Image (cartoon, helix red, strand yellow):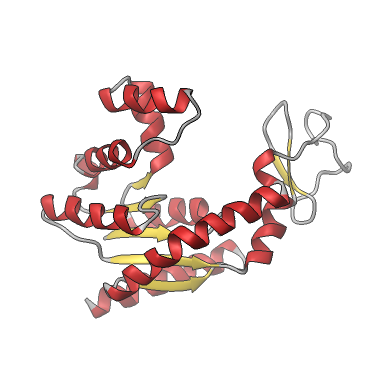
């Protein structure tokens, strides 16, 4: 099974990617993991990427693409993988298609996690983090015992910059602009399966598994 997971920030992609990869017995491949592995490993691609990251610049697509290609060529991905965070746009999707063709394979399914934008804002803007132990709470879904204080450290919780409403809405705008064409692209390729990402984690996983099974049976 070779799959791609797409969805807006706050849709639960990371959680679902981990669960689904374990259930399907395939590696979860995320761009974040790939960057960290290359930088910490001191690879040539990692050194190039670090130059951009240290300046606060975006890593160019050609470096990201090369890292992804190297990762997908590793032995543990020979029988399948679950990509999270790549591709982010149509040019990257075309690049991925070429990469897989070079490896003698192709995608089986692109799973889109769909969630209402106001729900995303509610999920993310309600998060509060402990500066000492790093635990993340939610003012509504996972509140600390004492408002504004970490249960373990007693430290004052804070809101990360990424979790501020204006930042979230900007990220959603970027996602819409970049990913709407990507979703249309994969729909045209006959690979897209869209599910609701609202509700308990187990329910979302069940929907994802059902959508993957349907794509498998139709192949």
130 vs 48, left or right, is right
212 with respect to 102 (left or right): right
* Furthest residue toward bottom: 218
Residue at 75% from the left image edge and 40% from the top image edge: 159
The residue located at (25%, 57%) in the rendering is: 94
Q: Is residue 163 above or below residue 184?
A: above
Q: Nearer the viewer, residue 216 or 64?
A: 64
Regarding residue 24, the answer to whether it shows in the image is yes
Whether 176 is drawn above or below 133: the answer is: below
Q: Position of residue 130 (x, y in %)?
A: 74, 33
Instruction: Write the residue at 21% across / 57% down.
Output: 97
Q: Where is the C terminus found, in terms of image quarters?
A: bottom left
Front in this rendered view, residue 217 or 55 = 55
The image quadrant that residue 90 belongs to is bottom left
Q: Is residue 12 at least partly visible in the picture?
A: no
Say whether residue 178 is left or right of residue 68: right
Give the vertical position of 111 relative to 76 (above or below).
below
- Please tell me which residue lies in front, 170 or 147: 170
């Amino acid at each position: 099974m070779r799959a791609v997971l797409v969805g807006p920030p706050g849709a639960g992609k990371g959680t679902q990617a981990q669960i689904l990869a374990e259930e399907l017995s395939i590696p979860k491949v995320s761009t974040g993991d790939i960057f960290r592995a290359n930088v910490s490993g001191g690879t040539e691609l990692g050194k190039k990427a670090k130059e951009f990251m240290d300046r606060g610049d975006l890593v160019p697509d050609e470096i990201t693409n090369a890292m992804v290609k190297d990762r997908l060529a590793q032995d543990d991905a020979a029988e399948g993988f679950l990509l999270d965070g790549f591709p982010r746009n149509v040019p990257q999707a075309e690049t991925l298609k070429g990469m897989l063709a070079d490896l003698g394979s192709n995608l089986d399914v692109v799973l889109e996690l769909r969630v209402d934008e106001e729900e995303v804002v509610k999920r993310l803007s309600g998060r509060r983090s402990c500066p000492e132990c790093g635990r993340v709470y939610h003012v509504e879904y996972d509140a600390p015992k004492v408002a504004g204080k970490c249960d373990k450290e007693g430290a004052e919780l804070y809101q990360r910059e990424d979790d501020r409403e204006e930042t979230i809405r900007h990220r959603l705008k970027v996602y819409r602009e970049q990913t709407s064409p990507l979703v249309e692209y994969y729909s045209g390729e006959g690979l897209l399966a869209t599910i609701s990402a609202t509700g308990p984690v187990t329910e979302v996983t069940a929907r994802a598994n059902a959508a993957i099974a349907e794509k498998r049976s139709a192949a």
